[in-house]
Structures are given as structure tokens and as C-alpha cells.
Image (cartoon, rainbow, N blue to C red):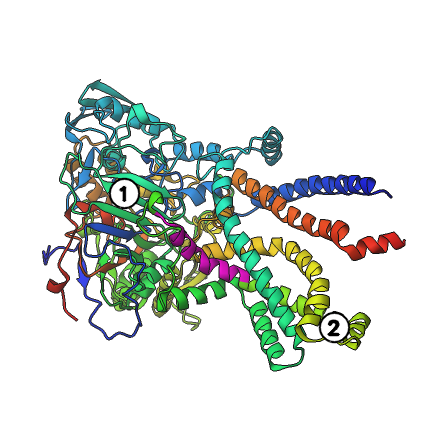
Amino acid sequence: MGDPISLSSHVSDGSISGSSDKLVSEDSDEPASKGSDELVVNVNSHTGEPETGFDPLLGWGCGHVNFEPLIQSTLFKSADNGSIINDLATNYSVSSDGDTWTVHIRDDVRFTDGKNLTAEDVAFTFNTAIGSNSELDMSNLEKATAVNNTAVEFKLKEPQSSFIWRLRYVGIVPEHAYKKETYGTNPIGSGPYKLVEWDKGQQAILELNENYYGKKPYFKKITMLFLDKDTAFAAVKSGDVDIAEIEISHANQTVDGYKLVDLPAARAQGLSFPMQYNTGKKSLQGDPIGNNVTADITIRKALNIGIDRKALLDGVIYGKGAVEYTGVDQRDFGNPEAKINDSNPEEAQKILENAGWKDTDGDGIREKNGTEAEFKLYYSATDQTRQALSVAVSEQAKQLGIKIDLVGASWDEIYANQYSSAVLYAYSSIDTFNLYQQYHSKEADDTYRNPGLYNNSIVDGYLETALRSTDQDQATKYWKLAAYDGSTGFGPAGDATWLWLVTIDYLYMADETLDIGTPQRNAGADVLGNIYEWKRVDTANSTSK
Amino acid sequence: MSNNEKIASFIGKKALRLTSLLIIVCFASFMLIQYSPIDPVRAYIGEMPVTAEHKAKLEAYWGVNTPPQEKFLNWAGDILKGDFGTSLIYRTPVIDVIEERFTASLILMGISWLLSGILGFALGIIAGANQGTWVDKAIKTYCYALAAAPTFWLALLLLIVFSVYLGWFPIGLSVPIGVTADNVTFFDWLKRLILPAITLSLLDIAKITMFTREKLIEVLSSDYVLFAKARGEKGLDLILRHGVRNVALPAITLQFLGFSELFGGTVLVEQVFSYPGIGQTAVSAGLKSDVPLLLGIVIFSTLFVFFGNLIADIIYEFIDPRIKQQEALV
């Protein structure tokens, strides 16, 4: 597991420090899992509790957060390095017009009720998903058809290279045993585990599927708890769980017998800048558009260059994360050319001076033609980490002579102000379609997908080509060009449309005896994604007290 | 007024009151959700990017663009037919969700109700009988402290002390971790109920204790107790014969009137102990604008509180011998 270059897993040992916490390890109530092939997890980001049950068509495994559905299997899965590999699929092809995808699947897979998984089931799954009204967005799929037992044809409304991510995360359900009302509580799938019991509001008990076609996981039983993070931390302290996600504010705490595991997240945190000048225009919903300060590229550039991201990382999130420049730095479709060197206030000040932003009235804030270098920054008031990030950014900006006024608000208020003020979003994804939505001018309507209303025809062209491409490598090339092509792009080296700051790791407390292998890159939220590699090791061999 | 007439008019009045109460409560709750600043679709999709087409579909599902009066009348019409609708977040019939969660909560509330009643009454009697002594002062201080403590804070405190540090109780949940239902013993189940039930009852104890204490002191200073004392009755005997008998009924009445607080308390306690009851469900229904589910819960909780008060009224009107006597005198 110890690949030193891999970014994917930094395991630090939290058990060495003295026993500042009095802990109870001899709890008579302790589950039988310790030291055995049974596992107790509390991984909020992975699951939370699926209110609608374990139904992929209503958001289990795919939707807001993408993760391994465990009970169902998917057409594709991710390799450790994040690339897409076959699972149920044996190969796939895309027609030259990009409208039709054909996926061939294995013929040896059975659902846990013994029936074969056929192309009909795959087609049924996706066709049903179209009208499910859930988190699962299938609006670009026209229809899925089973060509024969092992081949499915997906007819798209428009070519979409990012469709691969739909195929990656949607678990396949059996046509013969699917009823929308009951499937969620009684799911039948072909994944590595099957659901034994679901105590609503509390836990789900999964058992190994002995007939699983792939590599069978070591753990015969997984109990998923649905505790909130604070209660989960209490469960860690009382030794009740093997692995639990914890708050970033607990990063410096230690618990005997547990190690801290931090996994990189797929989503980055950053400030969206309104890109339009204020001309009094309103959005379709009547919200004001434009900001004369952030619409000036020199302000955006100066902030991108002058801000010290490393200081934010260390100061706000205890170094548990990574600095971020383009929102997709760590993805294979991220473009290193689009980055800039930051933490350079001298350079930033020079840019501002040259562009005419000067502090003439001596109040510490620059102005240009009577406009103060000042704008509002909205952040979700319920999120303490975002608040801390916002405060830290505004402090740093003050040094550059730019005044950022902070507004903690509810999401509805934030959305209403996003075209005229900066917003702190955690808004990027491993799904490439996100890039298209975020930066294409076509998406600049009254939704929040392109909050800055960015409009650059060259970038539009690259995004268009990438999305319509029938080849993933080709698509990746154009996604990169959209970030920066040497003269323009959405990245900080180009139009500097966002001020991306950091990605925040997902933190887990894991039992010392647990070996979680090499988690997939940037899949911090999908910690169980590589459950196949998880095992329990002898405590005697692990770090001693 | 004959007894039958009295009962008939009592039932009539109560039925009328219940109907109007339900209508007002449902309507008010509906308006609150309708005009809350939460956009259910945006709450549902969060920061996930979706296409405009998909967003429109979701808006239709959540009924964002349906006029409020139409939404309410549709819902009310279904309710009259006995159909509580389908929960938007759980996507199962509302009545199923409520049945499942309410049962869990009723057990919790029932136990803590009994516990607080019995303990509170006993403490009140002890304090009242020993008025002015250190026992009385200790009990009084204890009650004031409890009455001032917020429920969730007390719950967290108990959780930290008994579950995390002492490890006597599990950190929450109503079932043992990783054990399937058929292997859960009665003891497992009970053990998980103790801490939440105690927390919930602790808060009610203060009220009933103080009430009982006041009443007992009042009784003990009455003429008939003076008379009994003159006859030579004293100590425990006196308290039991004259004190407890006279205080019990008003105390029980008060305990039934406490249903609303019981229900309010259970919402907070369930959150802290991750106990899967109606309180937790009400919170998520409210936060996610699940109109059918929230209104369903509102109806059932209104009924619950109403019947608590009704029982108190019945005891008061029909069972309390003193009131009968007063009427006979009139």
C-alpha cells in the first residue's frame, strides 16, 4: 500500500500521543467485529442515510455524491489512479456522430436472487432513471435499448463525452424485481454485498454476496451506521466503530487505538467572480447582474496571484487538504499550464497599480475612476469552515488594497446575489460535464451553474468540442485547453474566472487494525470504493504504543 | 343537568374543538412551509450541477410552481378521504413513515412519562413532608437546576458522561450495532432506551415535584389535617392518608397536561441520541419542505397532545370527587 508518490492516502498515526482522553475499551457492548472479518463504518459523505433506500434510481450511489453502491454493480468502475475501467462492461464504443453509445457486458453475472443480469436489465435501469425525478440527472438520455443479451445501446439527445460518468455510477437493478415503492428497502443487485437488514434512522447491515463475480472483499459483513459526525466521534471514542468520518475541527484530536486517515476530496472550494459589468440588467428571476470591480480582470488576476493559498490551507484547515488553482488541479483533465504562482503580493500590487487601481484617498482601499476596489462575498452561514476561509481571504485581500465585505447567508439569499457578488462555493466534480456547465456561456442563465455568467467564445468552442467528442482522450485534451490554451481560458492564467483556494480532505478515524489499501485518487467521499482491498491486520504488527 | 346530558355536551364541545384545532394547525403549518425561505429543489440538489431540463422536472415533483391554495386543497381533499399522501423525501406513504416512527417515540415517551410521574410525585411528597429541612432544600435546588437546563444540553451531558466516559450505555441508536432484528434481545433493546428515557423524564420531574410539594404543604396546613393531628395521627400515616390522597389526582391531571412538553422534548432527545423516532423525522420533513409528511406529523402530534389534555379534563370533570361534590352542592 505504501506507494510514496501517490497522493491518495496520507495515513498519520494518531495513537502515539499520551492518553489525554480517558477511554473505555472494555465495553461489554462492543460489537463482535473487532479483530474479525466484520466491519462497522460511519461514513456520512458516502452514505448519510439514503432516505429513499438503496435504490440507485433514486440517488443511491449516484447524484449529489458519487460513490460505490456496494449492493449493485455498475458498468464501469474506477482504478486506483482515478481512470475508468470495466466492471460489468467488457468494452464500449461510441458512434462517429457521438449520439449512440454501445456497451457490451459480461454474460456470467447473476443477481442475488439467482437470475441472470442481462442487457435488458441495463436498459431497464437507465430508461427508468430518465423519469425518476431524483438526484440522478438523465436528461440527455433519449433511450436505452438491449440489442441482444450482452449489448446495450444508449441513444443520446446530444453527444456527451461525460456520459461515461453516468455509466460509471448508476447501479444496475433487476427488471424482474424492481418496484419503485419497495426496491429501496429490499434491493436486489449483483454487487459485492447484499442488504440483510435496514433499521431506518440507525443502521444498515450488509453481508458478502458469496456469488459475486469479481474479487471478493475480505470483510464478510459491513454494518453502516447513520450517526451524525459528532455522535460518530463519540462512537470512535467508545470504540464502537472501525472507521468514521469526523469533522475537520477534530483533526488534531487523538484516540487510542485509532489512526487518522485523510483522503483528498474531489470538490474544491473557491470564490466565483461576477464577470459582467453592472449595466442595471436583471436575471430572469429579477436578481441583479454584474459587478464593476470583479468584472475587471486585473482585480481577479491580482487576487489569484496575491493570495497565499498555502497559508489558508495551514491556517484554516490544519493543512488537511491541498492548494487549488483551477478547481480541477488533481484531475487528469486538469491543466497545469492554467495555474499561476501565487503568494506574490508585490506582483499583485504592480498589476493593480498599472491598471490604475490606486489608493488616492489614503483609506487603504484602492480606487479607479471613483470606484472603490470593494465587493461582497457571500458564504453559507451554517458552514464554519467556509466562514473561516472567507474571513482569511478577506484579510489577505486587505493587504492588497482590496476590500471584501463578508455576508453569511442562507442558500436562497446566496443564489439571488451570485451574479452581482462573489460567492464561496464548493463547486467542482470528478464529472467533466461540470466543467461545461460551469464555464459555457450557454449555461449562463438563471440557474447557478455558471454563477459568474462567464462568456468567452474561444472557451465555449473548446468545451463544445470536448463534450461532443467521441473519444475520452480527445475530450481530455479539449477540457485542458478550455482551462488555458496559452492565451486564454477559464483558469487563473487566462481569464481568472474564479479564485480557487483549497480542497479539503475527508478525515476518518480508522481502527489501527484496519488496512484500507490504496483508496482511489480524489475519492475522499467514496472511501468504500476500494472495499475489495480492505482487510484487518494483526494489531501486534501495527505501530506499538 | 343529568349525567348523560353532561357527557353528551362534553363530547360535543370537545369534538368541535378538535376539528377546529386540526384545521387551524394544519393551515398554519402549511403556510409556514409555503412561505419559508427554503427552496425545496435547491435544498435537494445542493451544489450539484443539474441541467435546466432536470431542474424543471424536480420542480414539478416538489410542486414548486403549483399555486399554494391548490396544493393545500388537494392535500386536504385527500386527507378527508383518509389518504395522507406520499412523503417527498422518503417516497413511501406518509402513514407508513408515521406509523413506524411514532411507535418508537411512543415507547420512549411512555416510559419517561411514567418515570417522571412516579419519581416526581415521590420527590414532591418527600420535599413537602419535610418542608424547610435540608432534604426539601436539596430537592428544590435540584428542581430549579433541572428546570433551567435546556433539554439538548442535558442530553449531551448524559451522553458524554455515561456513554463516552463511563461506557455504561451505548452512544445512541435503539438497536445494537451490527445485530439483526431477530437476534436483538429484550435486554439489548431496554439498555438503549434507558438513557434517552431518563433524559426526557428528568425535565418533567421538576415540574411535577414542585407542584406536588406546593399542594402537599397546602394540604398539611389545612383544617382537616390539623384535626387529624389533634386526633393523634402523625408521620407517614398522616401523609399517606390525607396528603397523598388529596394531591394524587391534581398531580395526575398535570402529568397528562404535560403531553405537549413531552412531545417537544422528544424531538431534541431523539436528535442527540440518534433515536429513530417521530421527532427526528419531523425535523427532516421541515428542513426539506416535505409538505405531506410534515402535515401528517402535525396532525398526529396534535391528536396526541389533544388527547393528553382530554384525559386531564375527564379526570377533572368526571373523576375528581371534590368537583362532583361541588356540583351536587350547587
Along the line of sight, the residue nearer the viewer: A284 or A112? A112
Residue B44 position, x and y percent, is 42, 42
Residue A447 position, x and y percent, is 42, 41
Which residue sits at x=33%, y=38%?
A54
Left-right relation of A142 to A361: left
Q: Is residue A285 above or below residue B77?
A: below
Can residue A468 be seen by looking at this rendering?
yes
For mark 1, does the 10 Å Cα neighbourhood hold few (<14), some (14 to 19), or many (20 or more) residues? many
Quote the CA–CA distance across marks 2 and 1.
63 Å
Determine which residue is flagged by label 1.
A206
Residue B192 position, x and y percent, is 41, 56
Would residue A170 be counted in the magenta stretch? Answer: no
Determine which residue is flagged by label 2.
B220
Residue A214 in which image quadrant: top left
Residue A527 position, x and y percent, is 24, 50
Along the line of sight, the residue nearer the viewer: A101 or B143? B143
Can residue A61 be seen by looking at this rendering?
no
Q: Is residue A47 above or below residue B233?
A: above
Chain of the residue under the numbered disc 1 shown in the image: A
Task: State which region is magenta.
Answer: B184-201
Residue B218 in which image quadrant: bottom right
Q: Is residue B267 above or below residue A94?
A: below
Q: Principal SS element in the magenta part?
A: helix
For mark 2, does the 10 Å Cα neighbourhood hold few (<14), some (14 to 19), or many (20 or more) residues? some
Q: Given the image, on which type of amino acid does mark 2 rest?
A: Leu
Q: Given the image, on which type of amino acid does mark 1 rest?
A: Leu
Q: Quadrant of the C terminus of chain A?
A: bottom left
Which residue sits at x=33%, y=56%?
A300
Q: Quadrant of the N terminus of chain A?
A: bottom left
Q: Secondary structure at mark 1?
A: strand
